[in-house]
Amino acid sequence: MPESRGERASRCVFCEIVAHRLKAYIVFEDDATMAFLDSYPFTRGHLLVVSKRHGARLTDLEWEDQMALIRTLDELCRRAERLSPDYNLALNAGANAGQVVFHVHFHIIPRYGEENPFLVSPRPALDANDARALVVELSAP
Ligand SMILES: [Zn+2]
């Protein structure tokens, strides 16, 4: 059931993070976007970049919010390159594409050369100590 543009979904976990009602390891925030560590990272430094406005898909967002997301992606890709020059940038649109949280988000997944290239490895939970170190490393402009 699609939601109207800009409407905040009840019980949307990313809207809760955007509102600072749910804890996340946030590395970037501006008026329109936010980036934080994935709770079940594929690799060290796996980031999620979200629009603050709720929409299930990129195409549910207004143009200005899409552009804000792209601007933030550029910044966060540069920061991810501090961890590794190689990374995946991915957006899953729809359940059949692997989307789990239906609030549009991009994944930035640093690649270190030893992981399964197809992103199907088991995903252990984010380590809190490492998460704090990553926030320091990735929060600096
Ligand atoms: Zn949401």
Image (spheres, helix red, strand yellow):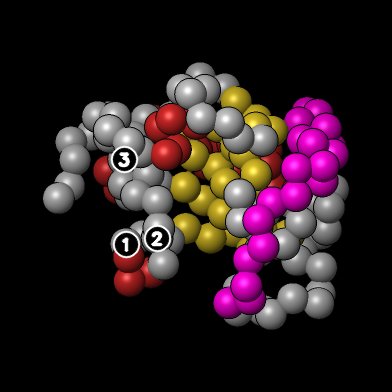
Task: Give the spatial CA distance, label 3 vs label 1.
Answer: 12 Å
Nearer-N-terminus badge (3/2): 3
The numbered disc on residue 99 is: 2
Task: Give the spatial CA distance, label 3 vs label 2.
Answer: 13 Å
Q: Viewer-proximal residue, 60 or 39? A: 39
The amino acid type found where label 3 is placed reads Gly
Nearer-N-terminus badge (3/1): 3
Q: Residue at x 32, y 36 (%)?
A: 11
Q: Residue at x 51, y 30 (%)?
A: 22
Circle count: 3
The amino acid type found where label 2 is placed reads Gln
Q: Residues within 10 Å of mark 2 (few under 14, many from 20)?
A: some
Please state the horizontal and vertical placement of residue 112, each as a whole percent of the image. 82, 68
Q: Residue at x 57, y 46 (%)?
A: 48
Q: Is residue 134 visible?
A: no
Q: Which residue is mark 3?
A: 55
Task: Give the spatial CA distance, label 1 vs label 2.
Answer: 5 Å
The numbered disc on residue 127 is: none
Q: Are marks 1 and 2 in contact (CB under 8 Å)?
A: yes
The numbered disc on residue 94 is: 1
Please state the horizontal and vertical placement of residue 63, each as a whole percent of the image. 34, 36
Name the secondary structure under disc 2: loop
124 with respect to 67 (left or right)? right
Name the secondary structure under disc 1: loop
The amino acid type found where label 1 is placed reads Gly
Nearer-N-terminus badge (1/2): 1
Q: Viewer-proximal residue, 102 or 11? A: 11
**The C terminus, quarter of image:** top right
Outermost residue, left side: 1
Magenta range: 120-141
